[in-house]
Amino acid sequence: MPELPEVESATEYYKQSMMTGFMQWFCRTGGKKKFSESDIEAKKEIAKFKAGDRNPYSWNMEFYEYEDGSGYEARFTTCGICTLMNELGLTKLIPAMCRLDYTMSEADCVSNFAKEYTIASGGPYCDCGYTKRSAK
């Protein structure tokens, strides 16, 4: 078996592979609706769906709006990427894939992305926080 790349190399490779012109357009277009009423309602519906209960390679998400109106948190309690990468013996490369959350937020031109916990690092969940760039 070939040697696994270092996380930094895999992160850059994955970013370049995923952030095509179309994907950048997709992020900017989605950014125009981010934080809208329809975006919030769609996130609430996704949270109800609990796809990870039926498919181990999908996600379960809880949705929390920030009380101050600055954004929201999508809290993932199961992660399909972690499941698959662990099964494939590629656990050390999971952070390379997770970094794309930040890259896509940068590309949407309206949100700041932050997380404190990740399932991959042993946390209880991934707390994907999105705040409006105009918010402090």
Image (spheres, rainbow, N blue to C red):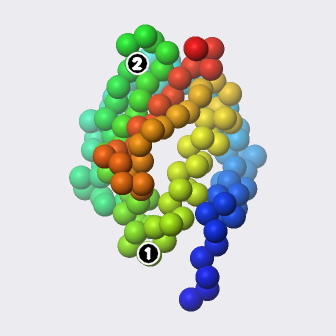
Name the residue type under label 1: Leu
Residue at image point 69% right, 49% down: 19
Q: Position of residue 89 (x, y in %)?
A: 44, 75
Residue at image point 70% right, 57% down: 12
Q: Where is residue 71 in the image (x, y as percent from the top left)?
A: 48, 20
Q: Examine the rendering and report whether any part of residue 111 can be seen.
A: yes
Left or right, 36 with respect to 43, comes to: right
Please, what secondary structure does the residue beneath circle 1 have?
loop
Please, what secondary structure does the residue beneath circle 2 have?
loop
Name the residue type under label 2: Tyr
Q: Residue furthest bottom?
A: 1
Q: Where is residue 2 in the image (x, y as percent from the top left)?
A: 61, 86
| Between discs 2 and 1, the one toward the N terminus | 2
Q: Identify the residue position indicated by label 2 in the image.
A: 66
Q: Which residue lies furthest to the top in this view?
A: 68
Task: Please rate how many residues cluster around mark 2, counting C-alpha atoms within 10 Å: few if below 14, some from 14 to 19, many from 20.
Answer: few
Residue at image point 36% right, 54% down: 122
Q: Identify the residue position indicated by label 1 in the image.
A: 88
Q: Position of residue 46 (x, y in %)?
A: 35, 37
Please state the total of marks drawn on the protein image.
2
Front residue of this view, candidates 25 and 90: 90
Task: Please rate how many residues cluster around mark 1, counting C-alpha atoms within 10 Å: few if below 14, some from 14 to 19, many from 20.
Answer: few
**How far is the residue under mark 2 from the one under mark 1?**
36 Å
Vertical order, 9 against 53 (above or below): below
Q: Examine the rendering and report whether any part of residue 14 can be seen.
A: no
Instruction: Say which mark, if any, is on residue 5.
Output: none
Residue at image point 64% right, 72% down: 5
Front residue of this view, candidates 26 and 112: 112
Vertical order, 120 against 128 (above or below): below
